[in-house]
Amino acid sequence: MTELEKMQQGLLYDANNDPDLIAQRLRCKDLCFALNQLKPSQVQEQEALLRQILGKTGEHFSITTPFWCDYGYNIEIGDHFYTNHNCVILDCAKVTFGNYVFIAPDCVFSTAGHPLDAPQRNQGLEYAYPITVGDNVWFGASVTVLPGVTIGSNTVIGAGSLVNRDIPDGVVAVGNPCRVLRKITEADKEKYRRYHHGI
């Protein structure tokens, strides 16, 4: 079994010494580097590079650079996906985002983890578990999502949260570790002031 196959099956694999995985990461990092050198006004060129990097995209999406990932082809984003500056996705396993996902600056999505046992870690072994995000999810600034987490649709993850467990649909969750604070209700539609013409 190759190291790539072990990675894809959630087994311990050699991430640091396998020539094939090293070459794949370098290819992706070169594409990310090229993306991050483009001017903000070079929207079409950015989109073309992102479609090369990512495994699957919706029709409409926006990724504000800088942006980094490991392999790229393990990332699937839905329609109207948006991430602000400094998003890092360590996609050694599949990372799937639904439609209308909004990501604030400085967020990290890491499928990669390392053994607690130091000799295994020192051999370059790691594991990778997938991350799945539903539709209409908003991540506040500086959120970190750890391996194996699923986040339900219509949920808000508060700024600075460390998400190390599954979060259900339709809630506000926050903290380190991230916990459900409350459900999102009809009253939340009236939370913010709106402009009304003539008033």
Image (cartoon, rainbow, N blue to C red):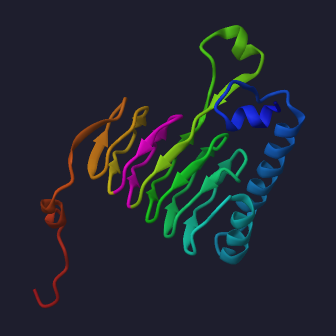
Q: Quadrant of residue 109?
A: top right
Task: Reply above or below: 144 against 54.
Answer: above
For this orientation, the residue located farthest to the bottom is 198
- Taking the magenta stretch, the answer to whether it contains residue 66 is no
Q: Which residues are magenta?
A: 136-153
Task: Reply above or below: 67 against 93.
Answer: below
The C terminus sits in image quarter: bottom left
**Residue at 70% across / 52% down in the picture?**
72
Q: Position of residue 1 (x, y in %)?
A: 81, 30
Judge left or right: residue 38 versus residue 2: left
For this orientation, the residue located farthest to the left is 199
For this orientation, the residue located farthest to the front is 1
Judge left or right: residue 67 versus residue 143: right
Residue 143 appears in view: yes
Judge left or right: residue 132 versus residue 180: right
- Taking the magenta stretch, the answer to whether it contains residue 149 is yes
Q: Quadrant of residue 194?
A: bottom left
Q: Position of residue 121 (x, y in %)?
A: 70, 16
**Residue at 67% across / 27% down in the picture?**
11
**Residue at 73% across / 61% down in the picture?**
35
Q: 158 and 197: which one is in front?
A: 158
**Residue at 70% across / 66% down in the picture?**
51
Q: Position of residue 113 (x, y in %)?
A: 61, 27
Overall secondary structure of the magenta section: loop
| Figure label count | 0
Q: Quadrant of residue 21?
A: top right
Q: Position of residue 168 (x, y in %)?
A: 32, 45
